[in-house]
Image: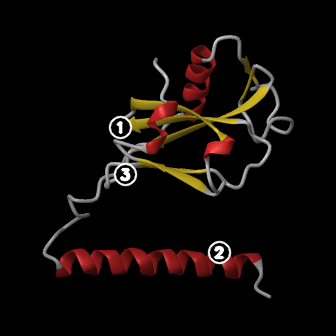
Amino acid sequence: MYNKEQRKTYYQLNKTCILELQRNQYKKNGRKSRSKGIRKIPPISWKRYEVIGHSLLKGSVYLNQSYDQHKNHDLLWNNKTVDVKTVQQNKENCWVFPLNHVKDIDLFLLFCLKKKKIIKTLLIPTSAIPNLTGIGVGRNSKYDVYKIKQ
């Protein structure tokens, strides 16, 4: 087994090698830095969208007190559990939400974003999702029947 110092040295060397490979690849392509085609979107604050979801669903209870008690759902609305998911639009102009096999959720409130602006808001029951691994939403989607007004 490696001790703590040996592991730290290994990870630093590995990181240095990866950075060196990237630099060599940029030089090979005649660029000094990262490609203009790759864009870095700043991370979104998902707590903000939980609060927006709480205001959209009138009479809902926002469960932000303890993460241990409510780790799978964010809201309680009409005695149904609601999980709020937020995703930026990808380069194929669609949104892919990972659902992580959550079985005790009744509804999913999905916020489809483009540059932090809400494009679509969907309230989808779990029964409408064939497998609970993930859901893909496009501009014109079969899930548009679950679209809610803001």
Q: Residues within 10 Å of mark 3 (few under 14, many from 20)?
A: few
For disc 1, the marked residue is: 114
Image coords of residue 132 (percent x, y)? 66, 54
Residue type marked 3: Asn
Numbered disc 1: secondary structure:
strand
Q: Are marks 2 and 1 in contact (CB under 8 Å)?
A: no
Numbered disc 2: secondary structure:
helix
Taking the spot 68% from the left edge, 43% from the top edge, the residue there is 127
Q: What colouring style does the render use?
A: secondary structure
Splitting the image into 4 quarters, where does residue 73 fall?
Answer: top right
Question: Any mark on residue 90, and which?
Answer: 3
Image coords of residue 10 (percent x, y)? 60, 81
Question: Any mark on residue 8, and which?
Answer: 2
Q: Residues within 10 Å of mark 2 (few under 14, many from 20)?
A: few
Between discs 3 and 2, the one toward the N terminus: 2
Taking the spot 80% from the left edge, 43% from the top edge, the residue there is 104
Between discs 1 and 3, the one toward the N terminus: 3
The residue most toward the right is: 69
Disc 1 from disc 3: Cα separation: 9 Å
Vertical placement of residue 75 versus 41, above or below:
above
Taking the spot 81% from the left edge, 23% from the top edge, the residue there is 79
